């Protein structure tokens, strides 16, 4: 019987499905073309979901997806997946950023050429019996000025192809540095308007976000040279289709080529279908055998590895945790989880903030992940958030009004390295800390006391007056209740003041035993918990 069930709800390559099926721990159902209500009915059975752009993964889907842990997007754009709902539900979303780059750049370039030379109209005209050489005169690409919005993977590949055609490229991308622009031999524009001003050709390669919605609008179209051609092979919402239609009708914009639409498929009365100079394809950018094999196999391995090993690659809603990182960070994650749990047991309830300090070599690691694990341990116990995990821990902390901060320092004071976690409530600060002695993790600091305690196991935590006989009494009570002591750590600050006794036990102490201990003179506080 397989441990994990994966639903493939959009068509991916057969090799991708085979790669998923290659794990005995995973069973796969390919069920494409589901209606939204059909998906809602079955999604609760699955631990993994693999999609392309057709399946809409809405908040309602997440609400119904009680067992879902991961979504793999066989492609780039994740705008069909509600990322914030995914994060809130602790579902990791991974895409495959590079497998369809070349195919999409080639398709966008093909659209630009087809638009410039009226390939689509010529084809339609010929098969309807015409030989129309006059009205189908085109424009040359050579020597034209091209604006690229979005110089990521696809934009960069498009630029190389344009340069081979003798086109001058100007690019706008908020993350494009001057040095990178120089090495790509493109002009760097500081704003989209500067890139678009005086352009003959435009191609879009940005994700659809609130900032890029209608990045091509009426005002920006006016900046283009008369007769300019616009290609959109990225996402429908990037272009204001109404503004495009008006400009085409007014004779300013020369033509539009679209692979993607605000609504897919567009309605039969889509206004741009009537445009004289236009080319349309049905979201075919990534539809090549090569791209589909690349992204299908890649996504299958990502989802399989996540479900079976916890490795996270190409996540869009949390830091990555590939198998190498997992190996180096893994022991720290376990220690962090224990520190978070311990803190939730001994710190006051309703803390305002959690502060995590990394001292020594651990500060060189991916501390964001480790902090997430501290939060996972803390929140799961303190707020009874059974569903808290690495993906949603920061969002749950925020929702509870818990401030989280992190600091690093190269040198630890008493140990080689230290993870120190404090829960803060007003003026009150409760701190626990852990370290490694060789490969063995140890908790070395609990609420102002130095101890040496295993980070996992069943524990009794006793605060008592520091005076003779108390430890003996505790031992006698445990022995009387047949609770075996596996380990014991004693710590005191000043002689005859307060001391703590942390006892690792083999079996959970009964409520009765706890009551007996609490009633013992000299014992201030007794807690029983499992880490
Ligand atoms: N038609 C199709 O079948 C396909 C469409 N796509 C679409 O193409 C888009 C680009 O894909 P890639 O190049 O692989 O992604 P990418 O992530 O490599 O590049 C996107 C670039 O856009 C830039 N960017 C973000 N906000 C911007 C803004 N406001 N203005 C200008 N640039 C901005 C980013 O800095 C990044 O460099 C994807 O988001 C996806 O929506 C991708 C593959 C296939
Ligand atoms: O990868 C992308 O962003 C795409 O748009 C490709 O979409 P598709 O997988 O062909 O539905």
Image (spheres, rainbow, N blue to C red):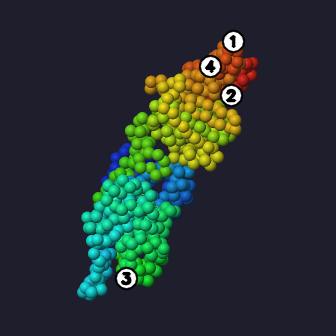
Q: Is residue 299 left or right of residue 130?
A: right
Between the residue at mark 3 and the residue at mark 2, the CA separation in whole angstroms equals 82 Å
* Discs 2/1, front: 1
Q: Which residue is mark 2?
A: 511
Q: Residue at x 63, y 36 (%)?
A: 423
Q: Is residue 321 left or right of residue 387?
A: left
Between the residue at mark 2 and the residue at mark 1, the CA separation in whole angstroms equals 26 Å
Quarter of the rendering occupied by the N terminus: top left
Between the residue at mark 4 and the residue at mark 3, the CA separation in whole angstroms equals 85 Å
Q: Residues within 10 Å of mark 4 (few under 14, many from 20)?
A: some
Picture disc at residue 69: none
Between the residue at mark 3 and the residue at mark 1, the CA separation in whole angstroms equals 97 Å
Q: Which mark sits nearer the N-terminus, 2 or 1?
A: 1
Q: Which residue is mark 1?
A: 468
Q: Residues within 10 Å of mark 3 (few under 14, many from 20)?
A: some
Q: Which mark sits nearer the N-terminus, 3 or 2?
A: 3
Q: Which mark sits nearer the N-terminus, 4 or 2?
A: 4
Q: Position of residue 74 (x, y in %)?
A: 39, 56
Q: Residue at x 52, y 60 (%)?
A: 58
Q: Quadrant of residue 443?
A: top right
Between the residue at mark 4 and the residue at mark 2, the CA separation in whole angstroms equals 25 Å
Identify the secondary structure beneath mark 2: helix
Q: Residue at x 30, y 86 (%)?
A: 135
Q: Position of residue 36 (x, y in %)?
A: 50, 63
Q: Which residue is mark 3?
A: 276
Count the marks: how many?
4
Residue 222 lies, with reference to residue 104, above or below; the image says below
Q: Residues within 10 Å of mark 1 (few under 14, many from 20)?
A: few
Q: Is residue 220 left or right of residue 397?
A: left
Q: Which residue is mark 4?
A: 491
């Amino acid at each position: 019987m397989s441990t994990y069930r994966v639903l493939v709800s959009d068509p991916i390559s057969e090799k991708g499905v085979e790669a998923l099926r290659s794990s005995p721990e995973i069973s796969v159902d390919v069920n494409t073309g589901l209606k939204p209500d059909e998906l809602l009915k079955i999604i609760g059975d699955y631990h993994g979901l693999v999609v392309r752009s057709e399946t809409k993964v809405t908040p309602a889907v997440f609400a119904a997806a009680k067992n879902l842990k991961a979504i793999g997007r066989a492609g780039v754009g994740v705008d069909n997946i509600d990322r914030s709902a995914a994060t809130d539900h602790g579902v990791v979303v991974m895409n495959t950023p590079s497998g369809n780059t070349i195919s999409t750049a080639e398709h966008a370039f093909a659209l630009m050429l087809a638009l410039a030379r009226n390939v689509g109209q010529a084809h339609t005209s010929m098969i309807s019996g015409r030989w129309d050489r006059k009205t189908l005169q085109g424009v040359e690409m050579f020597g034209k000025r091209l604006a690229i919005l979005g110089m990521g993977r696809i934009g960069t590949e498009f630029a190389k192809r344009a340069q081979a055609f003798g086109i001058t490229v100007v690019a706008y991308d908020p993350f494009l540095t001057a040095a990178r622009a120089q090495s790509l031999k493109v002009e760097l524009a500081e704003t989209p308007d500067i890139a678009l001003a005086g352009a003959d050709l435009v191609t879009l390669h940005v994700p659809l976000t609130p900032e890029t919605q209608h990045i091509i609008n009426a005002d920006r179209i006016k900046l283009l040279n008369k007769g300019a051609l616009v290609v959109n092979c990225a996402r429908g919402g990037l272009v204001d289709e109404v503004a495009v239609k008006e400009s085409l009708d007014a004779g300013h914009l020369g033509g539009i080529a679209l692979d993607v639409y605000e609504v897919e498929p567009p309605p039969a009365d889509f206004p741009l279908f009537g445009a004289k100079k236009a080319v349309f394809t049905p979201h075919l950018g990534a539809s090549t055998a090569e791209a589909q094999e690349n992204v299908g196999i890649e996504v299958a391995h990502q989802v399989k590895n996540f479900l079976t090993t916890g490795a996270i690659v190409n996540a869009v809603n949390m830091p990555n945790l590939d198998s190498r990182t997992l190996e180096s960070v893994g022991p720290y994650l376990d220690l962090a989880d224990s520190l978070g749990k311990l803190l939730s047991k001994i710190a006051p309830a309703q803390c305002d903030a959690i502060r995590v300090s990394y001292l020594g070599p651990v500060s060189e690691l991916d501390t964001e992940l480790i902090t997430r694990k501290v939060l996972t341990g803390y929140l799961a116990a303190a707020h009874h958030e059974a569903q808290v995990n690495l993906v949603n821990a920061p969002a749950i902390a925020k929702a509870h009004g818990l401030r989280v901060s992190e600091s690093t320092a190269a040198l630890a004071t008493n140990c080689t390295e230290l993870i120190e976690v404090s829960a803060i409530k007003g003026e009150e600060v409760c701190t626990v800390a852990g370290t490694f002695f060789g490969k063995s993790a140890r908790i070395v600091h609990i609420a102002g006391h130095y101890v040496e305690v295993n980070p996992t196991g069943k524990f009794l935590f006793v605060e008592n007056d520091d005076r003779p006989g108390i430890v003996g009494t505790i031992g006698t009570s445990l022995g009387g209740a047949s609770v075996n002591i596996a380990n014991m750590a004693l710590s005191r600050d000043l002689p005859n003041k307060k001391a703590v006794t942390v006892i690792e036990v083999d079996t959970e102490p009964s409520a009765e035993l706890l009551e007996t201990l609490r009633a013992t003179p000299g014992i201030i506080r007794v807690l029983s918990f499992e880490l």
